[in-house]
Image (spheres, rainbow, N blue to C red):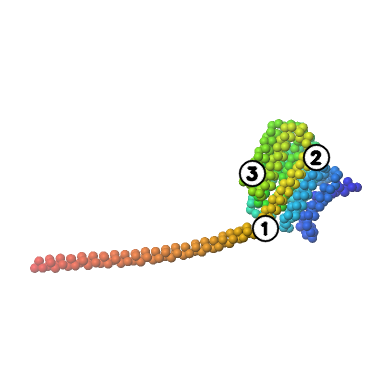
Amino acid sequence: MSEKIYAITLLFVVLWPLFLAVPMLRARLPWPRHLAIIPAAVLTLIFQDVSLDLDWLLLGTRFAIDANARWILTMSVAIWLTAATVNPVSNRATTFFLLTMAGNLGAVLAADLVGFFCFSTIMGYGFYGLLIQGGNMAVRRSGRLYIIFLVAADLALFEALLLAAFATEDLRFVSVQQAMAGSATTSLYFWMALTAFVLRAGIWPFHLWLTSLFKSASLSICLLLVGVPVAMGLVGALRWLPLGLSASVGPGLVILIIGITAIMYAVLRLVSRSTLRMLPGWSTVAATGLFIAALGVGLIQPAVWLQYAYLQYPLLAGMGILLAVMTLIVGRSQDRHSDDDPAMDRVEALSREVAQRGGVMLRWSQNRLHQIRCFWLALWLKTVQQASVVIDRLRTVNVVSQWTASITVFVLIGLALAWLAR
């Protein structure tokens, strides 16, 4: 009887946030974001492996929780509870918040490729909706870049899913890993799935949207960055890729070099010109680079990967919680510095007042200069007009005087000729 109750709890963990995501259904409930995570928090306290098969859902869906999934679920519960507490959000943003939570928890509990793909897709697009609700222009620009990478990742992951479906009818993670390890399309499947999860997790060199959001987004969004796209991208790589089953030295070396390069790049940015606010962002880039380097080592030496396989999920969960704690401490210190410093508040208020008064003075000066310019222009045109009238009159007088002199000369010549003719 208890196993059936635990199995129903698995389904309720996903359905309860979806139920509360409908605004009319949560209208009379207090703290809906905190209530939505309660079933998942209860499930983390059940130290028993439970599974639930739903053959009628998505061509056969299986939910399961074991020791590995419990580590990731515990990390997700801690991050979601913290994110629901630190920043209040609007009613519309709460819908996307709960949709993202449902997709995240469903991806954690999914035990097959189809379920993980569908719930991670809900999680990704719900997170995009959460980003653009109330975000500034910088957050929206980063969100556009994120959605581009997300669409490309979903296309690549869907192609990998089709390759796995052609190789085996059993799409559970363990079966797919074993089937793809000896398949003719192993290389294509591996690179398709790895590219998808690299894009989803914002791993270097596709980290631009990730670091931009750490720089400009709110504290709750920065917390969810660690638990939603980054952590689930790394979890998906562990579950989808056939690691530890065969050696691939060439691809392993390439992946190892990329991971080391990502670590060095993040460390250089941290020690060179990075601000305190960007400490969690570049630390996340370094942590994902370390994960990629470990994948490269696992491809080169499968025996080493299998030897330390029991540490994969605990280390991943610990890394997520550590990055979330770092993000929370840095975000709180930034808020305290901006809120509790009256001198800085006075300086900012004075600068705004100076800028406002300076704008008023500038407009007044521009108006005065325009009036002075118009006055002098009108005066100049009037002067030129009067000068032209005087010149015309002078020309008229000059012509008349010339004609008077000529007539006088002709008269004198005529009198002289008449006197001589006599």
Sequence-wise first label, 3 or 1? 3
Q: Could you tell whether 209 is left or right of 175 in the image?
A: left
- What percent of the width, then of the height, locates residue 79? 75, 49
- What percent of the width, then of the height, locates residue 282? 67, 45
Cα separation, mark 2 vs mark 3, equals 44 Å
Q: Could you tell whether 415 is left or right of 70 in the image?
A: left
Query: Badge 1, how many Cα within 10 Å: few under 14, some, many 20+?
Result: few
- What percent of the width, then of the height, locates residue 46? 85, 47
Please state which of residues 180 and 362 is positioned toward the viewer in this rendering.
Answer: 362
User: Label 3 amino acid?
Assistant: Val
Q: Residue at x 72, y 45 (%)?
A: 230
- What percent of the width, then of the height, locates residue 94? 74, 55
Image quadrant where residue 169 sits:
top right
Residue that carries the numbered disc 2 in the rendered image: 172
Q: Residue at x 37, y 65 (%)?
A: 383
Q: Secondary structure at mark 3?
A: helix
User: Label 1 amino acid?
Assistant: Asp
User: Label 2 amino acid?
Assistant: Arg
Residue 271 tag number: 3
Q: Is residue 249 above or below residue 413?
A: above
Looking at the image, can residue 375 be seen?
yes
Q: Secondary structure at mark 1?
A: loop
Residue that carries the numbered disc 1 in the rendered image: 340
Q: Is residue 327 above or below residue 91?
A: above
Kindly check if marks 2 and 3 are in contact, taking CB atoms under 8 A apart as contact.
no
